[in-house]
Image (tube, rainbow, N blue to C red):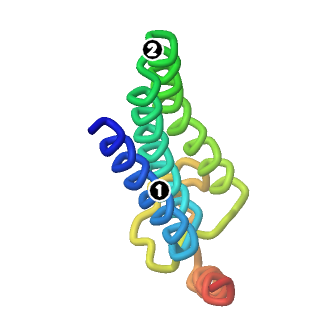
Amino acid sequence: MIEFIICVLLLIAASVVLLAAVGLVRMPDLPTRMHTTTKSGVFALVLIMIAVGLYFVRVDIVARVLSVIVFTLITAPIAAHAIGRAGYLSGISLWSGTIRDDLKEYYHGSDEAETSEEQEQNNQQVKSDQ
């Protein structure tokens, strides 16, 4: 019975990773790609670690599994935030369908609005990237 639960956990984790790969290809810009891969990657890793803990039922292995889960839950969002912020600051354009840019006033000044010509250039660049 425990082997069945382990197999189900591993199959769910593999499915989540597959969906993350599809999301990585299908999403239009860096922030949405980061969101897709970070959330699903952490979820898949947690499922795999639970399966490992169930397979090797020893105190030292379970302690390592729990420490890997906690470490990943702490560091993955921080790393994704740092990479996303670096991408934003380096000037990677957002998707043309982005409605709101909350960081613009902090990094580009609230009085510096993009002209329609700059917006058109960004939209053309996004379309050519797709």
Residue occupying image coordinates x 67% and y 55%: 87
Q: In this figure, which residue is indicated by the disc labeled 1? A: 14
Residue furthest to the left: 1
Q: Residue at x 44, y 55 (%)?
A: 102
Q: Nearer the viewer, residue 38 or 124?
A: 38
Single out the residue that lies furthest toward the top.
Answer: 59
Q: Earlier in the sequence, mark 2 or mark 1?
A: 1
What percent of the width, then of the height, locates residue 40?
A: 45, 52
Q: Image quarter for residue 109?
A: bottom right
Residue 22 image point, x, y percent = 51, 71
Element marked by disc 1: helix
Q: Residue at x 55, y 31 (%)?
A: 75
Which disc is residue 114 wearing? none
Q: Going 45% across and 47% down the picture, which residue do you hit?
A: 44
Seen as rendered, the residue at the extreme right is 90
The answer to whether residue 119 is left or right of residue 3 is right
Q: Nearer the viewer, residue 28 or 41?
A: 41
Tag 2 and tag 1, C-beta contact below 8 Å: no
Estimate how packed mark 2 is, as few (under 14), some (14 to 19) or many (20 or more) residues with alpha carbons within 10 Å.
few
Side of 121 where 23 appears, left or right? left
Q: Position of residue 18 (x, y in %)?
A: 49, 64
Quadrant location of the C terminus? bottom right
How many labels, in total?
Answer: 2
Of residue 4 and residue 118, the one placed in the foreground of this image is 4
Q: Nearer the viewer, mark 2 or mark 1?
A: 2
Gap in angstroms between the C-alphas marked 2 and 1: 25 Å
Residue 33, quarter of the rendered image: bottom right
Q: Secondary structure at mark 2?
A: loop
Residue 58: image tag? 2
Give the residue type at disc 2: Arg
